[in-house]
Image (tube, grey):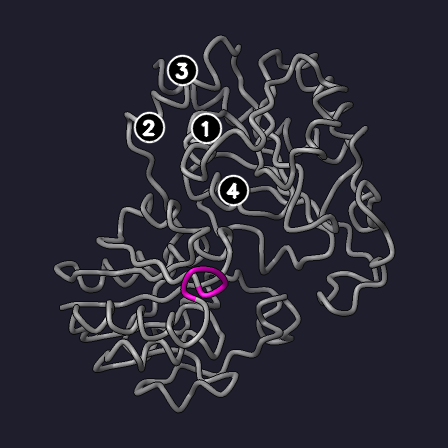
């Protein structure tokens, strides 16, 4: 059987959807599973152990417009897919299933794409993506996306998962982590844009108190667009290691696979670290933590959220839009360093217990 999965959103979205991909692969173990992703998430898709082949549809870049539609359609039709599944909830993904020639096309019928589907799951509103759907407000985004599989008889919870090859781990260790004392704490300090940022000075204080309490090292991670922000933090934490803007996507995921604890705002690195089985502390402000805190086993992710009256807020209706870079939204500034350290303490106790059990 040949199965197509379409996920054309950001890194965090794709990682959340690896739980869906895992459930599909476990239900159809002998299938060929092909994932269609954007250029930004291609490297992440190749680290998902349940994906057999990756096709890139860069609809904002090289595949823009009608020519791009024709190109991706031609490539996908060559497979002769039996089933196509749209894990996200956009019109584009539904249309792509149809153009790919999938015999069965499965997904939620929202946003006008129901006409392209042969098997429809329950209607999932656009608001569910932001934790604003009342019926789904307390469900993980992975659980919400798993609902699209119910027409196929798949009704199980499946956790997101990524795997990093040993040779890639060795490469990034030699390049970025060699010489660092353990435990290694990674900081994911910025999300998409500035509205999820925590205070620069708070990252400084947190780093100092972590090293004072536990020893070890701090690693800053992020993309080129976060370089200026993390440089400001690095100047205040000169003993840290700054990898921001120096890594590929697969490199920073490999770095996360080697750290002991990840602390970060709601963004791709938080989801990737969780999918790698790492202990995490997530800082949530404008986004719904019940929806966007990574779905993980055994309490590996501990999320902090202050339940302000204005949050979670919808992207186009934020009361804090006037705050510029390095400004911090009230929902994020309400999270204190002590709030984070309490969660870190719980994780570090668990890590110590795990190490003692391994030695026994």
Image coordinates for residue 358, horizontal then vertical, percent: 36, 19
N-terminal of the pair, mark 2 or mark 3, is 2
Q: Do the residues labelled 3 and 1 touch (CB within 8 Å)?
A: no
Vertical relation: 347 (above or below) 117: above
Question: From the viewer's perspective, is the residue at label 4 or at label 1 nearer?
Answer: 1
**Marks 3/1: CA distance?**
11 Å
Q: Which residue lies furthest to the bottom in this view?
A: 115
**Marks 2/3: CA distance?**
10 Å
Which residue was labeled with disc 3?
174
Which residue was labeled with disc 2?
168
Which residue was labeled with disc 4?
299
Q: Nearer the viewer, residue 350 or 125?
A: 125
Q: Do the residues labelled 2 and 3 touch (CB within 8 Å)?
A: no
N-terminal of the pair, mark 4 or mark 1, is 1
Does residue 20 appear left or right of residue 234 in this picture? Answer: left
Vertical relation: 283 (above or below) 181: below
**Marks 2/4: CA distance?**
27 Å
Which residue was labeled with disc 1?
255
> How many residues crowd mark 3 within 10 Å: few (<14), some (14–19), many (20+)?
few
Residue drawn at x 27%, y 46% is 49
**Marks 1/2: CA distance?**
9 Å
Residue drawn at x 57%, y 32% is 221
Residue drawn at x 85%, y 63% is 319
Q: Quadrant of residue 204?
A: top right
Element carrying mark 4: loop
Q: In which quarter of the image is residue 275?
A: top left
The boundaries of the magenta stretch are 59-63
N-terminal of the pair, mark 3 or mark 1, is 3
Q: Quadrant of the C terminus?
A: top left
N-terminal of the pair, mark 2 or mark 4, is 2
């Amino acid at each position: 059987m040949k199965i197509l999965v379409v996920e054309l959103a950001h890194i965090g979205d794709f990682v959340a959807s690896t739980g869906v991909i895992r459930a599909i692969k476990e239900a159809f173990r002998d299938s060929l599973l092909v994932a269609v992703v954007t250029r930004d998430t291609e490297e992440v898709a190749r680290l998902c152990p349940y994906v057999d082949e990756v096709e890139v549809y860069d609809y904002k870049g090289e595949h823009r417009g009608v020519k791009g539609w024709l190109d991706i359609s031609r490539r996908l039709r060559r497979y002769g897919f039996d089933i196509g599944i749209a894990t996200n909830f956009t019109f584009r993904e539904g249309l792509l299933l149809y153009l790919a020639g999938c015999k069965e096309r499965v997904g939620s019928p929202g946003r006008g794409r129901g006409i392209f589907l042969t098997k429809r799951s329950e209607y999932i509103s656009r608001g569910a993506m932001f934790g604003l759907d009342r019926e789904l407000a307390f469900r993980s985004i992975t659980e919400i996306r798993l609902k699209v599989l119910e027409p196929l008889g798949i009704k199980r919870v499946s956790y997101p998962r990524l795997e990093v090859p040993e040779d890639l781990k060795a490469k990034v260790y030699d390049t970025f982590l060699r010489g660092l004392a353990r435990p290694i704490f990674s900081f994911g300090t910025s999300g998409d844009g500035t509205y999820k940022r925590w205070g620069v000075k708070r990252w400084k204080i947190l780093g100092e108190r972590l090293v004072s309490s536990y020893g070890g090292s701090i690693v800053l991670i992020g993309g080129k667009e976060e370089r200026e922000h993390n440089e400001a933090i690095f100047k205040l934490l000169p003993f840290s290691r700054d990898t921001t803007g120096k890594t590929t996507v697969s490199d920073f995921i490999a770095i996360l696979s080697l750290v002991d604890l990840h602390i970060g705002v709601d963004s791709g690195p938080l989801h990737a670290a969780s999918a790698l089985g790492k202990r995490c502390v997530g800082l949530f402000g404008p986004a719904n933590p019940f929806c966007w805190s990574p779905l993980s086993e055994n309490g590996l992710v501990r999320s902090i959220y202050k339940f302000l009256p204005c949050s979670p807020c919808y992207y186009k209706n934020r009361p804090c839009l006037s705050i510029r870079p390095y400004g911090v939204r009230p929902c994020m500034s309400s999270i204190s360093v002590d709030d984070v350290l309490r969660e870190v303490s719980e994780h570090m106790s668990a890590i110590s217990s795990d190490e003692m059990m391994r030695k026994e």
